[in-house]
Image: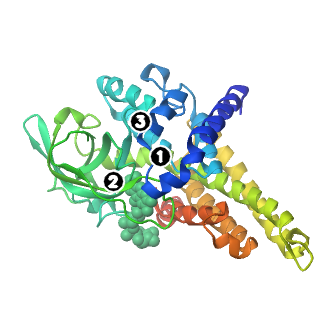
Amino acid sequence: MTDEVRLFRKTVRQFIQKEFAPHQTRWREQHRPDAEAWTQAGGTGILLPDVPEEYGGGGGTFAHEAVVLEELAQAGVHFGASIQSIVAHYILAYGSEEQKRIWLPRMARGELVSAIAMTEPAAGSDLQGIKTTARRDGDHYVINGSKTFITNGWLAGILCLAVKTDARVVGLKGISLMIVEAKNCPGYRVGGSPEKVGMHAQDTCELFFDDVRVPASNLLGPAEGRGFSQMMERLSYERLTVGVTAVATAEQALAVTIKYVKERTAFGKPLIEFQNTRFKLAECKTEAHIGRVFLDNCIERFIAGQLDDTTTAMAKYWLTDRQCRIVDECVQLHGGYGYMMEYPIARMWADSRVQRIYAGTNEIMKELIGWSL
Ligand SMILES: Cc1cc2nc3c(=O)[nH]c(=O)nc-3n(C[C@H](O)[C@H](O)[C@H](O)COP(=O)(O)OP(=O)(O)OC[C@H]3O[C@@H](n4cnc5c(N)ncnc54)[C@H](O)[C@@H]3O)c2cc1C
């Protein structure tokens, strides 16, 4: 934390409270944010806060990114700003200078929404099973296949797409990443939004590719076959963003529950006067605090370029596991009201569950940690 980051937090908080929070019921009903929300966010400087200014970003660090994610989580707003940053960092790391200048400034302004599309109906954890192909045809690739559960899918103007460029190669070596400009793109179709357990305001879609032609220059990186190692390098960023949301949500769950148990009475006294209430909240507060210290340490190390993949996997696994546990305890302390969607704690409970599943399931995180033993 610096004064500059604190000031940025104030701007982000005011913007989210004024422009996003009042529309949450409608966003949930329509299963996505309004398209204008992206340009509004871009205009306020909350998109790509840790991308260099020369490409239209905020010129900050991951601390700025963390502030945006924390403020969204605390307000209970689902808006795929982290996916926008994730895709931007793929382009920054593997794109050509020309590609960076074409896409990043428009992404920062919110004129271009992005999605990262890896998962397929038959391949999630096991990415070597992906079946979407990109066949070279002159100076283009021709893409066929489908992707599922893609965040920002409906509104996306560009996709960072994982494809098999060499179907003959078994396993991970035949995978490449390429950018698809999705607007007015013949053969490209967005399917409906699946009915999710939580995160109803988040734009999640299926994507279909039927002979979609993409310029060969949209391949990310110098050669085909680098996609899997590029994903492994960049997934750390994504996992850290999930950890940030986990801690912020756990802290918010605690805050609303502490308030609730002071107001709600049973047997003639506030719930907080029952020893069980205090003990449960004492456990939750301790775990949230440990999570915060661990996360802050990860962020510092990430900014210094010293965060290893094993520790990132630990953070993603442990912080999301604790998030779910803390939120669940907080639901219990709300009694029946904790099961009612009009109460923020109920939405937090439904929204939290997926944190243990996406960005690599927590079982896959344990595999990664296991490799280091
Ligand atoms: C709301 C939401 C948003 C998402 N957003 C995106 C997105 O933007 N882009 C994208 O590409 N994907 C996205 N995903 C997909 C997500 O990343 C996958 O769902 C996730 O990686 C798990 O893959 P799967 O669903 O195919 O489950 P599977 O891989 O079939 O796993 C099923 C179970 O088997 C376990 N398992 C699998 N392999 C092993 C193993 N080796 N050892 C032990 N256990 C194992 C898993 O841990 C899990 O418990 C999203 C998913 C959701 C629900």
Residue at left 55%, top 29%? Answer: 44
Picture quadrant where residue 360 is located: bottom left
Q: Is mark 1 within 8 Å of ligand 1?
A: yes
User: On the image, numbered disc 1 is attached to which residue?
Assistant: 80
Q: Report how many numbered discs are placed on residues in the image.
A: 3
First in residue order: circle 3 vs circle 1: 1
Q: Nearer the viewer, mark 2 or mark 1?
A: 1
CB contact under 8 Å: marks 2 and 1: no
Q: Quadrant of residue 38?
A: top left
Question: Can residue 201 be seen here?
Answer: no
Question: Could you say whether the residue bearing mark 1 is in a helix, strand or loop?
Answer: loop
Tag 3 residue: 88
Q: Quadrant of ligand 1?
A: bottom left
Q: Which residue is mark 2?
A: 118
Q: Say whether residue 92 is left or right of residue 255.
A: left
Q: Earlier in the sequence, mark 3 or mark 2?
A: 3
Between the C-alphas of marks 3 and 1, the distance is: 13 Å
296 displayed left or right of 264 = left
Residue located farthest toward the bottom when viewing the structure as drawn: 267
Task: Left or right? Give the position of 132 relative to 335.
Answer: left
Q: Which mark is residue 179?
A: none
Amino acid beneath label 3: Ala
> Mark 1: few, some, or many residues within 10 Å (few <14, many ≥20)?
many
Q: Residue at x 71, y 70 (%)?
A: 329
**Residue kind at label 2, given as amino acid type:** Met
Point out the frontmost of discs 3 and 1.
1
Is disc 3 placed on a helix, strand or loop?
A: helix
Q: Position of residue 357 (x, y in %)?
A: 48, 64
User: Which amino acid, by three-letter code, is at mark 1?
Assistant: Gly
Q: Where residue 227 appears, x then y in whole percent? A: 30, 46
Q: Quadrant of the C terminus?
A: bottom right
Q: What colour scheme was applied to this rendering of the protein? A: rainbow
